[in-house]
Image (cartoon, coloured by chain):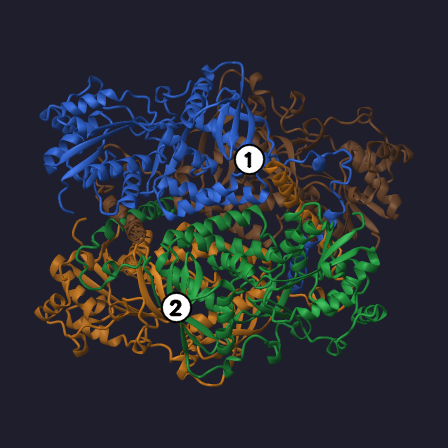
Chain colours: A orange, B green, C brown, D blue
Amino acid sequence: MSAPKKVVLAYSGGLDTSIILKWLQTEYGCEVITFTADLGQGEELEPARQKAELLGIKPENIYIEDIREEFVRDFVFPMFRANAVYEGLYLLGTSIARPLISKRLIEIAEETGADAVSHGATGKGNDQVRFELSAYALSPEIKVIAPWREWDLSSRTKLLEFAEANQIPIAKDKRGEAPFSVDANLLHTSSEGKVLEDPAEMAPDYVYQRTVNPEDAPDTPEFIEITFEKGDAVAINGEALSPATILTQLNEYGRKHGIGRLDFVENRFVGMKSRGIYETPGGDILLEAHRGIEQITLDSGAGHLKDSIMPRYAELIYNGFWFSPEREMLQALIDESQKHVTGTVRLKLYKGSAKTVGRWSDHSLYSEAHVTFEEDAGAYDQKDAAGFIQLNALRLKLLAVRNKRVKS
Amino acid sequence: MSAPKKVVLAYSGGLDTSIILKWLQTEYGCEVITFTADLGQGEELEPARQKAELLGIKPENIYIEDIREEFVRDFVFPMFRANAVYEGLYLLGTSIARPLISKRLIEIAEETGADAVSHGATGKGNDQVRFELSAYALSPEIKVIAPWREWDLSSRTKLLEFAEANQIPIAKDKRGEAPFSVDANLLHTSSEGKVLEDPAEMAPDYVYQRTVNPEDAPDTPEFIEITFEKGDAVAINGEALSPATILTQLNEYGRKHGIGRLDFVENRFVGMKSRGIYETPGGDILLEAHRGIEQITLDSGAGHLKDSIMPRYAELIYNGFWFSPEREMLQALIDESQKHVTGTVRLKLYKGSAKTVGRWSDHSLYSEAHVTFEEDAGAYDQKDAAGFIQLNALRLKLLAVRNKRVKS
Amino acid sequence: MSAPKKVVLAYSGGLDTSIILKWLQTEYGCEVITFTADLGQGEELEPARQKAELLGIKPENIYIEDIREEFVRDFVFPMFRANAVYEGLYLLGTSIARPLISKRLIEIAEETGADAVSHGATGKGNDQVRFELSAYALSPEIKVIAPWREWDLSSRTKLLEFAEANQIPIAKDKRGEAPFSVDANLLHTSSEGKVLEDPAEMAPDYVYQRTVNPEDAPDTPEFIEITFEKGDAVAINGEALSPATILTQLNEYGRKHGIGRLDFVENRFVGMKSRGIYETPGGDILLEAHRGIEQITLDSGAGHLKDSIMPRYAELIYNGFWFSPEREMLQALIDESQKHVTGTVRLKLYKGSAKTVGRWSDHSLYSEAHVTFEEDAGAYDQKDAAGFIQLNALRLKLLAVRNKRVKS
Amino acid sequence: MSAPKKVVLAYSGGLDTSIILKWLQTEYGCEVITFTADLGQGEELEPARQKAELLGIKPENIYIEDIREEFVRDFVFPMFRANAVYEGLYLLGTSIARPLISKRLIEIAEETGADAVSHGATGKGNDQVRFELSAYALSPEIKVIAPWREWDLSSRTKLLEFAEANQIPIAKDKRGEAPFSVDANLLHTSSEGKVLEDPAEMAPDYVYQRTVNPEDAPDTPEFIEITFEKGDAVAINGEALSPATILTQLNEYGRKHGIGRLDFVENRFVGMKSRGIYETPGGDILLEAHRGIEQITLDSGAGHLKDSIMPRYAELIYNGFWFSPEREMLQALIDESQKHVTGTVRLKLYKGSAKTVGRWSDHSLYSEAHVTFEEDAGAYDQKDAAGFIQLNALRLKLLAVRNKRVKS
């Protein structure tokens, strides 16, 4: 790979990406463009602009954008249509944000004529894979610079020395080692490393940042209603809201009631296990509600097919293959199923749980006329069940006859 | 089908199966053998014996058995090895009990020379299918009598008239209509019908029988440890226990903390939707714990394969195909995966939730040496990730090149 | 079910459906509308009109239609996009025609105000299921009359007596028993029953009707080129042709070269095994060609996903669920994959086989630059493979370490 | 990685692996142990011994073994139980041999105290992955030396110079470039590269080495019978034979009749497409026969489940994951299905095709009593089909009612 001339850097404004910024300038002598996105991580963006300027980035090379609506509308919601969970429990909060960041990096590279992009993910994690697969899928000729895999700044001490040597301001609280590492966006906060590295040990309370401890949540349940159209949430308690606003409000409900905490050991795509603490307050509520509305609007054929491909779909997103033909094929299948996933779910929020307690829809397939224990006025002829069972049993009977015959 | 001569009836001792007992005698003039099982439903069995005798069943034709250990060891535990849930949420508490009852019905029929078995499931539900597919799979020549599909006792009034006309004692509380219908065993209690038929309406509190309301559960969390060997729970808090004893104790923990409540609309195999309230106090804890121990003892290849076939496995159990070659094939796959699923999980029980907060095992695949944020002494070479990503990206790059070429 | 007033009958003009026609008139006293379709079965349709008139059907109630183009365009081609084969070998030639016939029956019923449809499939086969599931899916209130499940004309003798008693003309060759039963359309001919019922016995030569015996096929191979656009065949040897014309021509090539014969024992949806002789001359060629063009235009992610869902898709079509949400979801997935399945395949036809010998496309993903044994000018860095392997191996190494540790 | 001290080399005796042998000695100054296996590739092994000695390998360090029986019994046959084909057509002939070679390399390394193994696969192909994943799975601490990824002998000229400089004998026909590259074992021969690199061009006749051209095959069909026990072939024409003998004989039949040729473009695990010519004469016959015996001995539940997981199983073998938990889990599933796959298949071999024309078994599930067009004496009640269809249709009807209601 020839040396990059102009690099678009995913820049948070924090110490690590500031060091990367400077390292790119010194190592490659290249022009750096910074991209800082508001994905709902809950941090001010203006300090990132000031810091970028301080590090010598030209104002026209500083991109700062609020992409929360695009994030929820085009990434989070399509994923929730699938009820996607990774390894049974993880709602993919970090995974789903990476392809969008890469998409913007590539778009800015194309606008500015940059020949490379760069990110601050380490060589041990999944995020490097997600950033880079997305980048290459969108721009096959792009160069990707992953400083953590290249440089020799392999200890905290070396990083701080580099920062000091390059006049990078160091916040007081960054002098010492952080007790764990954090990623956040509108869908979730993840914490991992350091004090969390022993999966036998309970995570300390101070790790949790997005949710109150269920013990400290209100002693009285709260009930909310979420309305869906074609599989996407469109209103809370009857008020129509934009995608990002819905997720923001659900996060507030979840935070208050201590919903969405997960202590999890997962299999990384790069081959090792890691332990993370995830908080997905609004996501947990949304998943429960989406399942609730599907219960009455999807038939079993559609629902079971969705369930059967979901693990593969979640794995693709986890592994970084959002921009791949197979993810798009599965999305086509999922979206086809959601045409009638329209209606309203009522949920009870209480001390760490969100539970469906009612659901209704003009699109409902639930037929009280059929299921009733009362007289059903001929809606269903119980005698049909005899034939149904006989033909389902036929092959089992033939097997039993064969197995007895051959053994004896 | 020729008329049955001797019938083994799954007999609860309640009003409905007593009516069936008498109806079999009068309709077919056949000898009736009663089978009453303790599956952990929480009812005394001796009254069933007395009632059977009262209805003229010979003592040697009354079979009363405690099959709780067999139930948990050979049915519940194998199913939990798969983390089986139906349609995302239901732990299959009713489904998994039916094949065992059929198995005993058929064994008793073979011992006693009976040519038929009978059950009290209606023609609208799944249980008829589960009973009968199991029966035919084990005994292809057996006759199955399903009175609810045959007789004309189609209303409560007609049933009570039949009971009175045949000197069947009617408990006072059975005179009126029950407000909902219940099935129970050691794994769960389900309630459905009547007051629960509108899925928009929240289930009334009095429906719940196995768990306290989370609001009434202790205000302080409780922590327990469950130990697994080869995928099965073998001890609680370090005390080795039999399968049924473990589930019984977990039920007690779950009841106390309001764990395992589910308000659910499901797709029946017979083609309609129904709404049920399920309580699976011990099951919810066990599922969470089993996932917790798998997190550190299963590798991703095994885990993802299990996840991908789980929906099919759960569907088979739900639909009544426990005794089928495909369920046995899937079980062989699942059991193969559990050889090292051995270790201990620590859980927090609080106000409706059971959550893993720690797990450890001699069989752990978690490698702190690999995952650490600290120096890893060469356990992992971050530069390997570059090649890993390049080759995973290659086809995506080729796609991108193609797609750009052809469009333009 | 109340008695039907007006019935649309799938009418071939043959003896059996003529008997059904008369039986419907006499049994139910209802008006009968006949629908006779040209699906490429290779029979004249006008005799069916004359016979219907003879049996008293009013001219305006006789529907005769050539639906070959719709059949191939909307049913056969979408299915071939999936490379669908049932149980490894069967190209679903009968299965795929049934939903189209039902669709037209229902449409005619709606146009004419008929309240029922009827077909000549027996109660043992799959076709009754396919006809009726399609009918109900399109018109939930429709009545379906399946005379073979209802009447008592259970022997050849009784059928002929009924025919004679009702002045139904009987062709001379129908007096005796046919040695086997046939279904045919543009995609295939199936033969089953009678002389074919012993699956150990080789099918006699006279069973084959659509293909020459490979031994009698030309001694010289013939080469043809098939061009695809978005997954569908659009031209043969460079000549653009309509869907039905393409299949017709491929049938001619296949017939000549003895291609597409299959001796098969399959599992019917109704629970029994049956043995059929299938001839799918054009279909075999088309499947081979479609696989050939996919080889260079689909990437592995798309191809492997398609392969993994194909058996389920084929099973749905076989079982009669063409008009179901899950088939439509799978079709959306498959169609999404075919956007670039455009290009040309060269095939060698010889003595029973059609084999791809070359393929090319503007949409090709094949990169000689990457795969070459020669110098590749940096297209591919072999050193990347080391990292790729190391990270794929990591979990296997961790497993090996664990397994050695725990055993010892 | 520290330098290897003792290396076990997969040694064919050919020029390339002889160069590797010498390169290992000179580059690393390490002791080399050669392992040469008879996998049925059709070459004498003694020349390899002589050449190894000539290159200075001590006699006790030369391992030459006939592992054909192990190859077929423990690798080929288990794979054929699954009817495994990769991407619809490829019988995995190369893929399945690699794990066995690695297994022996590792066993020899353990016996001799070697700390490394080495192979001659290039950095572009799948074989490096298969060799190395197998090696690491069996011996996590082993070093693997892949000279093609390390050295700078990147052209034919450089290789020959190195050979001459190191007194490695060069066969006359190796002076020029081979027109394509070959791999062979008892299951198949593959040819790729050079003259085959353009997938549009028909492969020249001289590429085929294991089969006669179908045009040159006998003009008269030949019929053979293959007997299976529990899924494995055990006899041909009634003569019991060992696994390797069976495959050898089937190869002879296949060669004679021109069976098993495949012109194929596949997706390599490393991300690129490649074109290969495969000849699998015995394998094609065996696959057809195995499908034939499964047709009457497997029920639909077992068969459809096998079909649905087959693509994943084949992909695992192709990608090199033979020694992985998920392959072993799938094998457990497959083997569970084969308990009754016992019986005999009759095949017609003619001009490139092997086709099942009859099959019979004591374990047959085929029931003429059920399927017959004649009177079936009550084996099957056609009226059962009505109920079967009604309940299968119920959800489709409810969908149709809903879809009409909501649209209007």
Q: Nearer the viewer, residue C44 or A183?
A: A183
Give the residue number, with chain letter if any, for mark 2. B238
Q: Position of residue C154 (x, y in %)?
A: 82, 37
Residue B13, picture quadrant = bottom right
Q: Residue at x 82, y 50 (%)?
A: C6
Q: Residue at x 58, y 16 (%)?
A: C216
Does residue D290 appear to the left or right of A216 in the view shown? right
**Mark 1 packing: few (<14 Cα in 10 Å), some, or many (20+)?**
many
Mark 1 element type: helix
Outermost residue on the front side: it is B60
Residue D381, picture quadrant = top right
Disc sitting over residue B240 in the figure: none
1 and 2 marks on the same chain: no
Give the residue number, with chain letter if any, for mark 1. D294
**Mark 2 packing: few (<14 Cα in 10 Å), some, or many (20+)?**
few
Q: Residue at x 40, y 26 (%)?
A: D244
Above or below for C261 versus D223: below
Residue C225 visible in rendering:
no
Numbered disc in front, either 1 or 2: 2
Q: The residue marked by circle 2 belongs to what chain? A: B
Calculate the distance from the C-alpha at mark 1 to the C-alpha at mark 2. 49 Å
Q: Quadrant of the C terminus of chain A?
A: top right
Q: Position of residue C312 (x, y in %)?
A: 54, 46
